[in-house]
Image (cartoon, grey):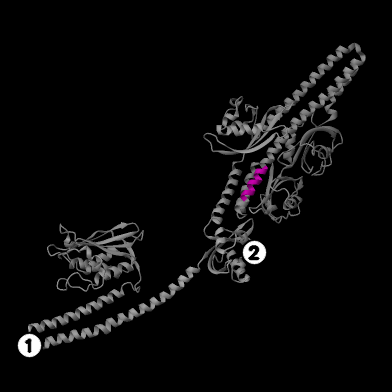
Amino acid sequence: MVLGIWLSVGLLVWRDRADSLRATGLLTESLTRVVSERVDGALHGVDLVLQEVTARHLGQGGRDRAALTSFMRTRSVAFFELRNLYIIDADGIVRTSTLDSLLGVDLSRRPYFQDMKAGNGRDRMVVTGPIPSAATGRIGVLAARPIIGRLGTFEGVVVAVLNPGFFNESLSGVMSPDVDRSVIANAAGDVLARLPEMEFDAGKSIRSGPLFTQHLPKSRSGTFIAESTFDGKPRLASYQALDRYPVVVSIGVTVEAALRRWTFSAIVVSVGGVMFTLLVLVIAVLLDRRNRAERRASAALAASEERYRLLVEGQKDIIHRYLPDTTLVAFNKAYAAFFDTDGDALIGKKWLDFVPKEEHAEITEALASMTAKSPTREDRRRVLRPGKPDCWIEWRTTAQFDGQGNLAGYQTIGRDVTDAFLAQQATAEREELYSQIFHRNPAVKLLVDPTTGLIVDANESAAMFYGYPVDTLKGMRITEINTLSPDQVKVEMEAVARQERLFLRFKHRLASGTIRDVEVYSSPFHVGGRAYLSSIVVDVTERNRFEAELASKSQELVRSNADLEQFAYVASHDLRQPLRMVASYVTLLSRSLAGSLTADQEDFIGFAVAGVKRMDALILGVLDYSRVGRGNESREMVDLGEAATDAAANLGLDQPDGEARIEIHGPLPAIMGVKVELVRLFQNLLGNAVKYRHPDRPPRLSVGCRRDGGDWVVWVQDNGIGIDPQYFDRIFMMFQRLHGETEYEGTGIGLSICQKIVRTHGGRLWVESVEGGGEGGGEGSRFLMAFPAVDGVPGLRELVDFS
């Protein structure tokens, strides 16, 4: 029986020891998880800042550093853990920094820069150990990301300097009499923070300790007992490696402290075993102490949970816990504020009800896919909130399982990444815009490196024009298609790069060997500190040929005009001189034979003089026709209202006692032309209207206009005898008359001159008429002229009435 009692005592003591270690392990695991989530959230915020800075740097092409520096300083103020932000170019030189004293400093020898330049750490953030600043000497922890260009090239590193005190502050909330050691290290084992602090060199490594050599390689989280790297004491420690970043958090308790209560219990139990008579009392005491130990453990857990609650309440991230059916059991103020709802009203509600129904199936499936081996899931979704702008939230959900592996619930942390998402979206849109403008453009386009002459990019239109596939063109140099020497091509590219010349003429060689004349419109731009030339190539071979032919024909036209001017000179002098002589001598003959001529002889002489005069009038008409539109007179803006008024005055239609009456309905437009010719145009039309008056009514003339699309249509209306429609085309031909000389005088050239004047002004002339003046006798003829409109130019603004 005594043996049985001692066996019972031994089992009880051993179980009490295991319970003490287990309770302490639960405490350290809980505290480790709290610190890990806080550090992970803070580092994620820093990572988003680095991504935003990278997007802006790539979007601006490194041109507006002042604006980028201002943006970086604004972001630094928003995160207390950030001390400084700076950008290192591909050569290791600091080009942009919120700390001016760091600008121009060469950091190319820093291990993290060399590592990223070598291609390690691509598309992830790296956390270094504490290192002194190259500018101030202060100790800081660096969070860095490589800058990868659009073409996949390394273009530098964006770095955030973190205050080491931030990591110490993250640990300060978990220190207590039961917890005496806590540490945060990076993936290389460099200590980022440790409490309590001791005199040790900055960046001391725990890489050789049991955490990194034995436990971390096997599992990313856990609890173990080993000798401390710092003081050599055996400790029970829990650790958690962050999923997203190379950081490890470990919180420990000395085994002595963890077993302090157990040691005392063991002594009491041993004494009770010796004192058989006090067995019942000893057992009662042990049970009581066990209960109290459990209550203390529960109290410690409760205190830990309270510290956790206080910790998450101060977070800006949206944090909430919920059951497997999404019923909310806990959340922070940021979560309630995000949904603009009172916190108490959310308890017991399912947050899935806040999500659009069309997303329910996807979210439920995502939650169900999480297992104990893969308990973490990240996704980014757009959140719709009534009355508020849509936003993009990055969610990180962790499934929580009990000791038996059953799902107990979830914890989700959300961070607003709208700005970063919109920046990424803007970058994608710019890339699509580039593709639309460059690759899908029908124009021939090349992208050339001016330093090497290498064709960096070419579109499909360029491939079709040159006869090479796009991939082949992108491997060629511009000197392979330009017929100039390489030195001449280099000089031209340098001139374009300096913006001294943006328009060039070359001869380009196609894949077939054909040489084509081209005009190149080229402009420089910079991406990631590198210069490029964007060139549009236009094939002008056929245009040059047409221009050469046009120049040849223009020379022929100049010679023809010269011959015409010579003919006009001969006609006006050599042809008219004999006619004037004939007319003079016939007139003298008539006078010398006056009184001796018969009536028939006088008629004959009259016919001869009239014929000579008519011939002279015809010659003058032909000369006038040939002079129209010669281009000797300069063109100007001519008010057609003024031209019509001057023409009416020249014909005497402005006399108040005259029989003919004319009305000019203004305003008439102004056009580009020769005023003398336009006055003559109206003078011929108005003169014809008076000449071909109806014998039964006085002449009534009117001038007006209307807008017809891109033309001004101006007309001259009369109430004369009208014109048969079958002669509408004939009346504009040279020397064509519809009436005999005895009825109406004239040469038959006037309307031909009118038509030529209108055509030389870019217009057209036609007639509308009813022969006889219509049934009412008031229609007559209407001559219409269409001139190209010159918008914004006013004409005559007053109504002119010569009645």
For the C terminus, the image quarter is bottom left
Residue 559 versus residue 250 in the image, above or below: below
Where 283 falls versus 258 (above or below)?
above
- Relative to 213, residue 9 above or below: above
**Quarter holding residue 246:** top right
Q: Identify the residue under disc 1.
A: 596
> Which callout, 1 or 2, points at the residue further toward the start of the chain?
2
Q: Residue furthest front?
A: 512
Front-lying residue, 81 or 570: 570
Magenta includes 565? no
Describe the element under mark 1 as helix, strand or loop. Answer: loop
Amino acid type, label 1: Ser
Under circle 2, the secondary element is loop
* Near-viewer residue (445 or 576): 445
Viewer-closest of 525 and 262 = 525
Residue wearing tag 2:
451
Residue 429 in the image: state x and y as whole percent.
Answer: 56, 49
Q: Residue drawn at (17%, 87%), measured in percent from left and top? A: 585
Q: Residues within 10 Å of mark 2 (few under 14, many from 20)?
A: few
In the rendered image, which quarter contains the N terminus? top right
Of discs 1 and 2, which sits in the foreground? 1
Quadrant of residue 358 within the rendered picture:
top right
Disc 2 marks a residue whose amino acid type is Thr
Q: Is residue 473 above or below residue 185?
A: below
Residue 496 in view: yes
**Residue stretch in magenta:** 46-56
Instruction: Please indicate whether residue 369 sits to the left or right of residue 768 in the image.
Output: right
Magenta region, main secondary structure: helix
Rendering coords of residue 791 (x, y %) = 36, 59
